[in-house]
Image (spheres, rainbow, N blue to C red):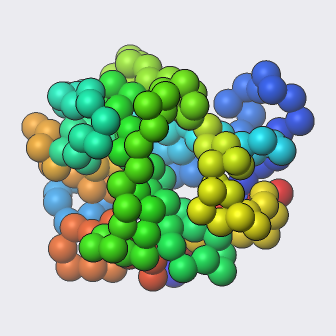
Amino acid sequence: MERQYVISRIKEKQFNWSDVPKLPIDNILWEPDCGIRAFARLCYDEEAIYVSLRAAEAEIRAEYTAPLSPVHRDSCLEFFFMPENGDRYFNFEVNPNGCMHIGFGHNRADRVILTRRDDTEFFRIQPERTSGGWAVSYRIPLLFLRLFYPDFAFSGSLRANVYKCGDDTAHPHYLSWNPVTSLQPDFHRLEDFGIMNFE
C-alpha cells in the first residue's frame, strides 16, 4: 500500500510550521513498540524543499558530530526521496546534534556518500531539544538537487519515505511513514516508498 502526502507550497519566507500538514511516521517495524513517536512536515518554494522532523523520545542518543558519521546508530530522523521517474534516490539522515549523513545512489550497496564543508549553513540545519524529545529542520536547495538531476523541478511527484530509527539507542527502534515489507531492518527499499505530490 502506497501512502500519499501533499508537499505544500509556501509563499513567504517566514512561515509557521504548524500550518504545514503533518506526515505521521507511525509504522512500527522489526522491534517491539518502545513508545517512541515521530512525525514530519514538508513544504517548498521556488528555491528549496523545507523539512521538519520531530520525535517524542525520552532517552536520546547523540554521539556523532563529524561529517560522514553513521548517525543511524544515534537517535535519527531520515528522509529518503527521488523524482517519480528517477532511478537513484537521496537519503538525508540527521541526529539530534544536527550531524547530517547524505547518500545518493541506486540502492544500499550502490551509493555515493556526500558531504560539504558548509553543510550546516548550506542546508540550514537547525537541531532542537524539546520537552520529551528532539527535532530538526533543514532545507534542500533546488540548486543542490539539480547537480544530480539537472531537470529537477518542484512539480509532479516524488517517490519517498520518512523514517525514525536508533540502532544503538537504549531502545533500538525503527519507524516509517510508508510501510516497509522486508523481514530484516532495511530502509533502502525503493519498492517501499510512498508518493509525495507537489501542491
Q: Is residue 195 left or right of residue 181?
A: right
- Which quarter shows the C terminus? bottom right
Q: Is residue 166 visible?
A: no
In-front residue for pair 35/5: 5
In this rendering, position of residue 124 left or right of residue 127 = right
- The one nearer the camera, 184 or 64, is 64
Nearer the observer, 169 or 125: 125
Q: Residue at x 38, y 18 (%)?
A: 129
Q: Quadrant of residue 140?
A: top right
Measured as percent of width and height from the top left, residue 186 is found at 27, 69
**Residue 117 spot, x, y in % from top left:** 43, 31
Q: Position of residue 32 (x, y in %)?
A: 17, 57
Look at 72% across and 53% down and name the residue there.
7
Numbered circles on residues, count: 0
Q: Is residue 86 above or below residue 72?
A: below
- Judge left or right: residue 171 versus residue 58: left
Residue that extends furthest to the right in the rendered view of this protein: 11
The residue under the point 74% across, 34% down is 19
Vertical comparison of 125 with 24: above or below: above
- Asked if residue 116 can be seen in this view, the reply is yes
Residue 66 position within the rendered picture, expressed as x and y whole percent measured from the top left: 26, 30
Residue 76 as seen in the image, left or right of residue 161: left
**62 w.r.t. 173: above or below:** above
Residue beneath the point at 76% across and 67% down: 151
The residue nearer to you, when weighing 88 against 18, is 88
